[in-house]
Amino acid sequence: MAKKLGVYICGGCGISDALDVDKLCGVATKEFKVENCKSHPFLCGEEGAKLIAQDIQEGTNTAVIAACSPRAKMDVFNYGPSVYVERVSLREQVAWVHPPKDEDTQMLAEDYLRMGLARAQKAEPPEPFSETIDKTILVVGGGIAGMTSALEAAKAGYNVCLVEKEPSLGGWIAKLRKQYPKHPPYRELEDTGIDACIKELEGNSKIKVFTGAEIEKIEGAPGMYNVSLRQKGAATSLKIGSIVQATGFKPYDPGKLEYLGYGKYKDVITNVQMEEMAQKGKITRPSDGQEVSSVAFIQCAGQRDPAHLAYCSAFCCMTSLKQALYVTGQNPDAQVYIFYKDMRTPGQYEDFYKRVQEEPGVFLAKGDVKGISEEGGKVTVEVYDVLLGENIAVNVDLVVLAAGIVSNSMPEVAPKVEAVTPDGEKKVTEIVSDSGRYATPALHLQYRQGPEIPTLKYGFPDSHFICFPYETRRTGIYAAGCVRQPEDIAASMDDAAGAALKAIQCVEQTARGQAVHPRTWDKSYPSLFMQRCTQCKRCTEECPFGMYNEDDKFNPLPNPTRCRRCGICMGSCPERIISFKDYSVDIISSMLKVIQVPEPDEEKPRVVAFLCENDAYPALDMAGINRITYNPFIRVIPVRCLGSVNIVWIADSLSKGIDGILMIGCKHGDDYQCHFVKGSELASTRMGKVQETLQRLVLESERIRVEEISISEFKKIPQIFDEFMEKIKSVGPNPYKEM
Amino acid sequence: MEKRNVIKPDSEFVRDVIGLGGESLKKCFQCGTCSVVCSLSPGDKPFPRKEMMWAQRGLKDRLLKDPDVWLCHRCNDCTAYCPRDAKPGDVLAAVRSYAIMSYALPGFLRKAFSSPMYLLPMLALPALLLFAFLGIAGDLTFPKGAIVENHMIPNPDAYIGMAIIVVFVAVVAVVGGFRFWKGINEFEADPPPASGTRIGWLKSFAFAAVDIFKHGDFGKCQANKINRLTHLAIFYGFILLLLAAFLGAVYHLAGIESPYSLTSPIKIAGNLGSLLLLAGCGLAIYRRFSTASNNRSKTTYFDWFLILLLSFVAISGVATEVVRLAKLSTATYSVYLVHLWLLFSLLIYAPFSKGAHIIYRTLAMAYAKQVGRAV
């Protein structure tokens, strides 16, 4: 479709006070030969909006609006899916942060307009990927989280298939005698209510339950998964839209707790064994079958201990308090000791803690267990009492270890992979976490990057923990319950409802051809110019979401509904064959090309800053709103993720005479904030390599800098800008300027 | 191998402390706010946090030998700030009550304080003693002629009977005090006293006495400033009355017999003392009924026993004087009889009631001065 461009410059909000709008118009009409350039003192007002709307009615299909930030007034400057709108931020990034009627301010505005025009000339409005999709939700795991997810999704009107490998539903909750209180006044134990839950589930016509079933493989992508099941020997195939993985937990192997007497003394048991015993009836000593009259609970047995489980399992404190009531309920004269590192009873559970404290026979003490031994038919627990600063000991009938849990994703032994080195040597390497292969099989995904969702070092799924906890690194697959993080029944149920909602959002977004979190409005998707593909596998390896499969010849096979539209593959591609309709290597390169670079003797250096659209770019807007001034020699280009920055842009910039390149994105590493998980990490690795190359070319590596900030640190952006400009000044002008 | 410090919670003890007014002790979650806000607690091993924990765990032995329990003046700063409403002030008071009863011998008498149901026999005992005493000394009739209280006891040798009771009370008190002193020294011997060097016992008692006369520790309390005033009134009232009694004995030995003129030193001391005692008791009773938010402590039977007995002793004493001045012979002797009976009760039960704190607190304060635990 032929482009018909219209340029609209707003003079409002102080723009016309700071800039020469007519001169700006000249950039469009003279340099870019745009016939239609209009300015208005109040473009977002009724009259201004009419001005643009009329042009569009008359055939303008690309509007360059030089006014406020693209993050402002999105509803006003929206002309439907067939009109491409490019926003040039003259307000937040020019008029509000630079001195008015200044030469450098005007130059900055003109450059921004050129960049906007360059982009508008090449970008097209995206056309959504459309395919017939199925909206059925698959829930894997029939414990409390899985059942809740299934019920919530069904109640919202979606068909659900629930797969459970055990012959019956219920999971761990079905093995409990009672649960600790979930309702006000949070004082007395409650029934689990599991039978009613199963009955409700089985009676729901929208839910199809497969018990005793296992998944053999899952092929495809969100909206069009093909799931192969095996139930009691018979194979079934399902069409699925999205998946909730609620495969639960396993108790931490108590065999590793010998230092607490487990396995050494018969009367040392785990909280799981205690619950089993309680469900069967009387609580007795395993050694002689006598009813217990004194019990010691040891909290954090092997938990919050780097040698065992480094984390807190979230429910053991409450469970021990509950089990203490089992003991005093059976024998009111019984003495129960609870030794803890910290008693963790969050929220309303504090009331239950108070309730158990009232029991005359329950004694709580903060301490470290020093030793466990057996003497005269009793188990002696020695504890260093932290608060009193002394060692104490108790003789009891039974010791209960409040052992923790491990995500069912956590592999028991790290899987190994065999590979042949280029020398023809066979080499076995251990797979580490942060990979789709480091997990216990559950989903059997037919993905190039491995059969399971990528997990972190404790086996919990990798996800952006703060912003979108249920998202995993596989689009359309959402983790809920203890497979995701240690949590109790109530939290698992909340989690399950959340994950069900995400699964529903996924099928709905996919049906519209839109991305899921975080670019939920985005209809673009990558297309590959395959003739030039060299099968280097960078895109298939580096996509954090496993979007690409591979054929036998290592050609990438995109699955657009798995895509999050971050552009990391675009940044990775050395052949630059991956493009979005409105975001490509060529588009950004064109923007770079139109930046005017003054001669070195003018002493006006130029720096290009790539800012991540998720945190850094909004932070820059906030700096603008707060009128924090900064250096006018910097040209900002928003990018979808730092991972989408292709190194050819660095080369383009430097060869053009740009003096420095700044990249500002989200934090990476263990507590990463990157909205696309791996983007900022990949960017800093790539830039590290670019810096090496620069040094080889005898160019100063200081010309490139990667910075990380979070959205709240907007005050830091101008500081980063100014500091970097100081550095560039000391390094001197780019020698390529003169060529 | 190190000797194991095996904990055997004494559930009976926990129940007793709860029964003596410490019912909130189980609420404590060991945050330590109490020790932080207490202005009397030393920095090293502060109270009442550790006492709360020992009480929760039923560690009777430790609490009985713990001098810190007695450094507390129950101003309730801790109770006012406790986030759990565990009322450490009440719990320590209950532990003190328990300690008094444990140290006093013979045991049956301390049992009598455990419940109001023993009140009648308890009051009957001093009455019987009084009658026996009067029966031996005289003929159980009211004297004729000028109204002189002392004429109720015509034979001065009968004072020997009085002396026997005083000796009994003193023995009980000294034995209790000795057992307590042994206990606190045992307790603190391991580990040895922390900060500060030990000072001589004479010096430490002197320091403690100065503190007691000044009521300095009471002055440091924040939540209930009025406690200091109340206790000062009772304390000095008591001292003046003791002085009057002492002067009475001196006058008697010097051959100066009663009645004395209202302007004589003995009468001035006695009347002033009575008024102070009445005022103090009145304040104490008023405070127990007031609903001020910083006064949420519970008043137990153990507590009421002393305060009411003391009040009635003071009231009956004043009443005797009033009716005597009104020249009502029979009434004077009757009221005096009642006064003697109440005085007897106060005296006999002193080592078993809250009154025994005179011994234990003094010892504990001296001990604290000695080992440098006093703030």
Image: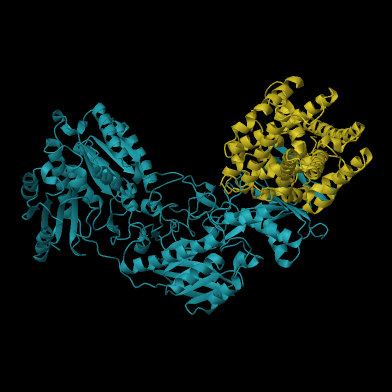
Please tell me which residue is depicted at 11% across the width and 62% down the height of the picture.
A50
The image quadrant that residue A153 belongs to is bottom left
Name the spot of residue A155 as percent of width and height, x first: 45, 74
Name the spot of residue A163 as percent of width and height, x first: 53, 70
Residue that extends furthest to the front in the rendered view of this protein: B145
Task: Determine whether A413 is above or below B181 in the image.
Answer: below
Q: In the figure, is residue B349 to the left or right of A2?
A: right
Q: Is residue A444 visible?
A: no
Name the spot of residue B95 as percent of width and height, x first: 73, 43
Report the quarter where the N terminus of chain B lies: top right
Q: Which chain is yellow?
A: B
Q: Is residue A440 visible?
A: yes
Name the spot of residue B203 as percent of width and height, x first: 73, 20
Residue toward you, A374 or B162:
B162
Q: In the figure, is residue A45 to the left or right of A185?
A: left
The image quadrant that residue A106 belongs to is top left
Task: Determine whether A173 is above or below A602 in the image.
Answer: below
Q: Which chain is cyan?
A: A
Q: In the figure, is residue B161 to the left or right of A524?
A: right
Please tell me which residue is depicted at 82% across the width and 28% down the height of the picture.
B257
Residue toward you, B326 or A489:
B326
Report the quarter where the C terminus of chain B lies: top right
Q: In the figure, is residue B134 to the left or right of A624?
A: right
